[in-house]
Image (spheres, helix red, strand yellow):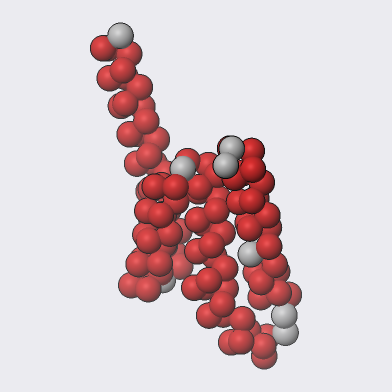
Amino acid sequence: MNNGTKRSILRWIHLIFAIPIIGYVYSPFAELPNYAPVVRFVSIPVLILSGFWMYAGVVFAIIGVALWLAVLYLSGYGAAILSEVALFVGRKIWLVIRARQSKRSA
């Protein structure tokens, strides 16, 4: 499968799994408990997986989803968002170090 087809499939998955979040945000307050588990444990992890996969590759996507689910379960939403920010910062540092090392060896 070429990269264009893979990206198109991931983009559609990303768009389709965003629909339950819209339903969660705009549903009546009494119906929130019905949407919450689906949004927390299915929709958001699939969005993270597809988004990170398009952005940085499958390994980064799997690490991102595992980190999100673990920290969400252990500490809540605030810590989960901070852990994702830390993951992006760590990835950026790793890329800069790798670029500097390849520049020195060349």
Q: Position of residue 13 (x, y in %)?
A: 63, 58
Q: Position of residue 95 (x, y in %)?
A: 37, 30
Name which residue lies at 56% across and 77% down.
38
- Quarter where residue 68 is shown: bottom left
Location of the C terminus by quadrant is top left
Residue 25 visible in this rendered orientation of the protein: no
- 102 or 73, which lies in front? 102
Q: Position of residue 92 (x, y in %)?
A: 40, 35
Name which residue lies at 41% across and 47% down.
60
The number of discs equals 0
Relative to 28, say whether 61 is above or below. above
Relative to 1, say whether 70 is above or below. below
Relative to 84, say whether 19 is above or below. below
Residue 89 visible in this rendered orientation of the protein: yes
Q: Residue furthest front?
A: 1
- 26 or 63, which lies in front? 63
Name which residue lies at 46% across and 43% down.
57
In this rendering, would 87 be left or right of 32? Answer: left
- Quarter where residue 77 is shown: bottom left
Location of the N terminus by quadrant is top right
Q: Position of residue 34 (x, y in %)?
A: 61, 87
Name which residue lies at 31% across and 26% down.
98
Q: Residue furthest bottom?
A: 30
In this rendering, would 19 be left or right of 34? Answer: right
- 93 or 49, which lies in front? 49
